[in-house]
Image (spheres, rainbow, N blue to C red):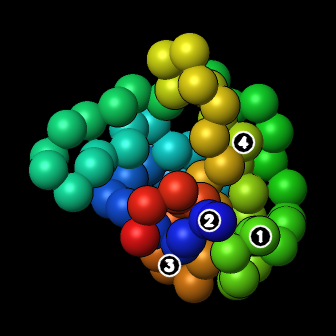
Amino acid sequence: MLYKRYVDVITLVDREGKLKPLILIWENGLQYPIDRILEVRNATSEVGGCGILYRCRIGSQERRLFYEKNRWFIESTKP
């Protein structure tokens, strides 16, 4: 089962207003640099909600990061 988990993200906003997530910050303060953005599109999450999906490579893992109404969340296996 997946859960919606809100996270802090350091984001670059370019002069055209496009968002580029750079670093995901976990609840305990650990920072995970986003190595590569594989895809950006509007999408619905499996856990509910919708927004802009950023399919990202963080280390050796692929994560689905969503930007929804001025907040970031990931689909997590833990609440």
- Identify the residue under disc 1: 46
Q: Position of residue 56 (x, y in %)?
A: 64, 35
Residue at horizontal 71 percent and vertical 82 percent from the top: 48
Q: Quadrant of the C terminus?
A: bottom left
Name the residue at 52% across, 26% down: 58
Q: Tell whether 77 sits left or right of 1.
A: left
Q: Secondary structure at mark 1?
A: loop
Residue position marked by numbered label 4 in the rendering: 55
Residue 10 visible, this angle: no
Q: Which residue is mark 2?
A: 2
Do labels 1 and 2 touch, CB within 8 Å?
A: yes
Q: Which residue is mark 3?
A: 70
Distance from label 3 to label 2 (Cα)? Answer: 21 Å
What separation in Å lies between label 3 and label 1 (alpha carbons)? 19 Å
- The foreground one among 2 and 56 is 2
Does label 1 or label 2 sit earlier along the sequence?
A: 2
